[in-house]
Image (cartoon, rainbow, N blue to C red):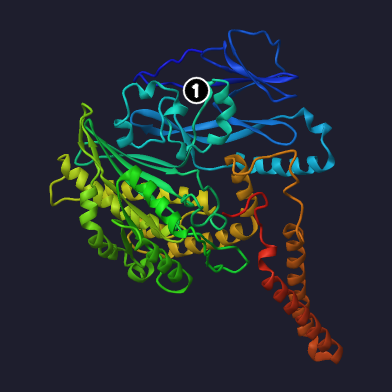
Amino acid sequence: MEAPVSSSGGFKLYDQLELQEFEDKFVIRAVESPDQGFSIGLRDGDVEPFDGDPCFGSPSKVSTIYGVVGTIRLLAGTYLLVITSRKEVGSYLGFPVFRVMSMKFLSCNDALRFSTSEEKRDEAYFMTLLKTVESTVGLYYSYETDITLNLQRRCKLAEGWTSKPTWKQADPRFVWNRNIMEELIECKLDRFIIPLLQGSFQTAQLKLKKSPATITLISRRCTRRLGTRMWRRGANLEGDTANFIETEQLLEFEGFKTSFLQVRGSIPLLWEQIVDLSYKPRLRIINHEQTSEVVERHFHDLSQRYGEVVAVDLTDKHGDEGELSKAYADEMQKLPNMRYISFDFHQNCGGSNFDNLQILYDQVSDEFDNQGYFLVDAEGEMLEEQKGIIRSNCIDCLDRTNVTQNYFAQKSLNAQLQRIGVLSSTECIAMFGEDYEIFKTLWVEQGDEISLEYSGTHALKRDLVKYGKQTMSGLIKDGMSAISRYYLNNFQDGIRQDAIDLISGRYTVNRNSPSPFQLNGFESFSYLPIASALLIGGLTLTSFTLNQAGRNMQRCVSTVFWAGLTAGVTAVVKINGRQFCSRPRLCRLL
């Protein structure tokens, strides 16, 4: 199969495909080259490439799709994931970027009718997980370039690198569908293989004294420890952390391109925070003989990739967060040549004191200036290199972290604009109202998107980024988001975590292994409605009989009975809170 290139000389994927449905197979053809494509059998799920024009007959249905994401084999057969709608959201270094708007799994599993009753039951749950995967948010891609590599890395690649298949160019850390591309790779279907990036992609135009510039904010979520807010905390034994994201701020102006990188990630210790129906579950540090090695592995990897690392810890210095922060600080003291800064965000910036982040900036300003940013001119000559990175974290690495990263990004943007002569040494982006609003909006929308992917809700503290203070409407929105997070974390995220573990390959379906859904103890999904009904019914009857209690002794006894029953059920639910929550069933936490 030929490997055509884009107008810039890079590898180009097929951007529109025709899906043909037959009685025994699906056939996918490139619209621009109908003789190029592959078929996938409905009985065995085998992928068969073709290069020519094989005669399959007349399909029963024909539809347009916009990409093949990958294949996954479950108990009863194979499922093919395809992109059914997309939206162009901007460009990255001149190449169009698209957001996945909808996906669909195509079932290739006629073997289901030969499965046992237990296998059919398990397959039904797996299919529920696939439905969850279909609704995954924040997936981006380009047909003409790889968007997983930051600008500095791209500029240092060997000549001819961009002519390789896109999946070979990509940074595997940031390829969301890496696990389900394998069969397509084996079949050498390079022009059909789309590496998807999960994260955020925001872009806008700045006027800058009537000198137009393009600013782009792209966040890349690492796939090594994917998961939901409460079911993926801390690090694994390899040193990979939950919610690890590389964020790149790009500026393009009159041929100049600048890039500023930051990273965030969960505190790289072994710790957990298991949901138990309480609003804020207790944090638990896991004592493990390899804890120090885990921290060292994490920071060694960062140093190898980004250079000098400054770790900024934004957690509280009291309560459970304080204990976790202290354990983190103790481990950081063991690492030579590693700067660790503890900055209690709530204490310093509480009461809308957003400007107090200047205190933090003053502590890191020397390293910040030394690390710099990446700058390349119109001829491709590298004028500046970023020599290190700031790694920020709070507990979730969402709200406090986003506010702080926005602050650092603004400082870097000012330096870049002054360096290329757009602003004088006494000017800053905040002095240009319309451009400054655009800049802040990019960061708010980016924070919302990566928060949706990890916690299921929009980010909190959005007002601090957009207005520099907390507003009443912002407080109300934060309250609603906090309630939504509570519900999702306690009653939905177990299923979502299973879906992530399945699609990422952390859990592999094996017909010879026992069912992962055999219950130990009672099933939370069955008992939660019962417990809720008892609580609500008990409270209702208690209130009713209390109103009638003054009329006779029997009513008083009835009131006491129902009040006691309600209190008893409440106590049982509280003590067994973890059992009533949605829990992952496929994989262990670490």
Q: Nearer the viewer, residue 401 or 254?
A: 401
Using the rendered image of the protein, determine whether residue 535 is visible from the camera's viewpoint. yes
Residue for point 48% across, 33% down: 87
The three-letter code of the residue at mark 1 reads Asp
| Residue furthest to the right | 554
Q: Position of residue 523 (x, y in %)?
A: 75, 58
Label 1, secondary structure: give it: loop
Residue at x 65%, y 58% (from the top left corner): 491
Residue sitting at x 79%, y 40%: 119
Q: For mark 1, what is the residue?
A: 15
Looking at the image, residue 142 sits to the left or right of residue 437; the answer is right
Give the side of residue 32 with respect to residue 46, left or right: left
**In the rendering, at what x and y percent does residue 62 appear?**
65, 19
Q: Quadrant of residue 338 in the image?
A: bottom left
Is 420 above or below relative to 284? Answer: above
Question: Which quadrant is home to the C terminus?
Answer: bottom right
The residue nearer to you, when weighing 92 against 228, is: 228
Residue 162 sits in quarter: top left
